Image (tube, coloured by chain):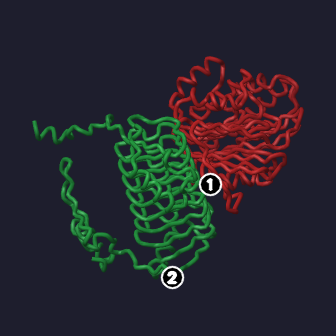
Chain colours: A green, B red
Amino acid sequence: MASLKSEELKKMTQEERANALGMTSEQLTGRSMFIEFDPDAEERMTYPWAPEVDFNKRSEIDVNDMNTTEVNNKIRELMDEGYGTIVIKNPRGMHSLGVGILSRLNLIIEGSIGYFGVGLIDGPNVRINGRVGWSCGENMMSGTVIINKNAGSTFGAAIRGGDLVCRGSVGSRTGIDMKGGTIIVGGDTGALSGFMMQRGRMIVCGNAGKNLGDSMYDGTIFVGGEIESLGVDAVLGDFSENDKGWLERKLKQYDLFPQKGVASFKKIVAGKQLWNYDNLEPTEKKLIL
Amino acid sequence: MCGIAGLIHKGKTSNIGSEMTSMLQALKHRGPDSTGFAVYGEPSLGEYIMRVKVAEKEDIEKGHGILDKIDARIKELEKRLSDHKAKIKEKKKVTEYALRYIISHDGDTEKMARFIEEITGVEILSLGNGLELIKDLGDAGVVSEQYKLDKFKGTHAIGHTRMATESDVDIRSAHPYWAFPYNDVAVVHNGQITNYWIMRRELERKGHRFMSNCDSELLAVYTADNLSSKVPLEESLKRSISEIDGVFTYLVATDNQLGMAKDTMAAKPLVLFESDNLIAMASEEVAIRSILPQEIDTTDPYDEEVRVWQA
């Protein structure tokens, strides 16, 4: 499977391609979900076209005179050549930098980037020695992103996995619609953070703005500082020893463990009164009737 | 989408014309329909700079006999200036439809401005001791070159690059908006105002004039209304957050201040850079980095945040 190339995939029908990539074209019915996923099958865990890279092979790119497309293509070229550590210099607040990397890679960005940075990634370890604009790490599937300065709004929107860490403060709607993974904020976060969150965990070491966790379905938010207000259906949860242990491990991992410890952190979860958690879907009701 | 930008040099003048051009050019992708600048030069006491539009750009391309009409409008405008005992000290026809006057006048500038705007097709874009408001169709590079902004020196400026969503692509709907009749006050806005018509009717009943159907003009008129009631700029910005519905981030510049306000949802972006000598802000960091290429520390103002800086 891992040997499949994009040329071969292009020759397949949509159904063949879906099966080859570990997906399925079978119609989903009701709440049941057909999951064709076997963790023991290695080919299901990798993208067929993802290049094998060597972390000891390092390359530096000065992107001062390049545009976003040229930089992203250059990263791919270097990965195809086996480079596993790539350093980007002079990004100048460029948008959409480092998006769609679906493989292991050490990506180091020396400077600030703009909107939609390192979105849609699955696997790389990214370190950004600067600030990021809106929607950093959007739709991230796995890997690690560490930002050393502040971040804009909608930080980690709809992430599904991995660790997204901002050492500074972030804007509004952090982790909006997140479906997994962990978002860690060293400073404060703005209004409506965790809005419509579905799964995953968010840690805010500083203060949280108004309407925290508004309309969240599930997931957990931990806040070390003050909370301006909780959103609709967001409630304080019981802070267990398990939570404490996990928080300590996570924050120590990213050198963000607070001097006062984590015992005073508040845990916010969904009250589960807003949505129809215990009711059947309309289609399922029809079947019963 | 629209892009907004502002910069203020503390206690010194700088080449703000070329700086704002670079910032707005970097935001071109946020709106290519029109570009506008409100730049503040050295205030000339006792003299007013008046930027005026006597036709729309498309009138020149399509209007029958428009050049004769323009000549008649300019003649009438100058007659009305004279009627109000305003002396024209300098006159420059920058384009076929845009003029710049330097006038001296001791009387009521609001009365004079209203009298001039009664002329069909004439709109005063700005009137003030330091403010010059330039707006036209095209990107920042085109407009800046057309109006020779590259050499403009001053203390502060705001600018706008527009993607037309709520109203037409023309100069009357382009930003910035002058807060008529307050000399030297201009506004740029990114967002949508959802109680526009309710607010507009309220303000019209108070006697305020609207020259376009663009929702952003409301913020200029709203600011003018507050200033007329002696409400300080910072208080006006704070009130707007609860009184105006919608998603917005907007900047207001006066002869010696620059202010910003962000709505309760924080749905429209603004990136802010502050140092001892310079404050720069824009919808995207790329705009700030176009004048400050070195690595800088920037922040995103939060929801309901209001800030005012002095020049």
Establish if A48 lies above or below B142.
Answer: below
Q: Quadrant of residue A33?
A: bottom left
Q: Residue at x 53, y 74 (%)?
A: A86
What is the number of the mark on residue B217?
none
Residue A36 drawn at (x, y percent): 22, 63
Q: Residue at x 65, y 25 (%)?
A: B209
Q: Which quarter of the rendered picture does the N terminus of chain A lie within? A: bottom left
The label shown at residue B285 is 1
Q: Nearer the viewer, residue B269 or A230?
A: A230
In this rendering, the label closer to the viewer, 2 or 1: 2
Q: As rendered, which of B249 and A268 lies closer to the eye? A: A268
Quadrant, the C terminus of chain A: top left
Q: Secondary structure at mark 1?
A: helix
Foreground residue among B140 and B122: B140
Total labels drawn? 2
Query: Dividing the picture into quarters, in which one does residue B70 lie?
Result: top right
**Measuring 22% from the left and 69% from the top, which residue is drawn there?**
A16
Q: Is residue A158 left or right of residue B51?
A: left
Label 1 environment density (alpha carbons within 10 Å; few <14, some 14–19, many ≥20): many
B169 shown above or below A89: above
Q: Position of residue A206 (x, y in %)?
A: 56, 47
Assign a secondary structure to mark 2: strand
Which residue is identified by label 2?
A57
Q: Would residue B265 be found to the left or right of residue A47 on screen?
A: right
| Among the 4 quarters of the image, the one containing residue B112 | top right
Amino acid type at circle 1 is Glu
Q: Is residue B71 visible?
A: no
* Nearer-the-camera pick, B63 or B49: B49
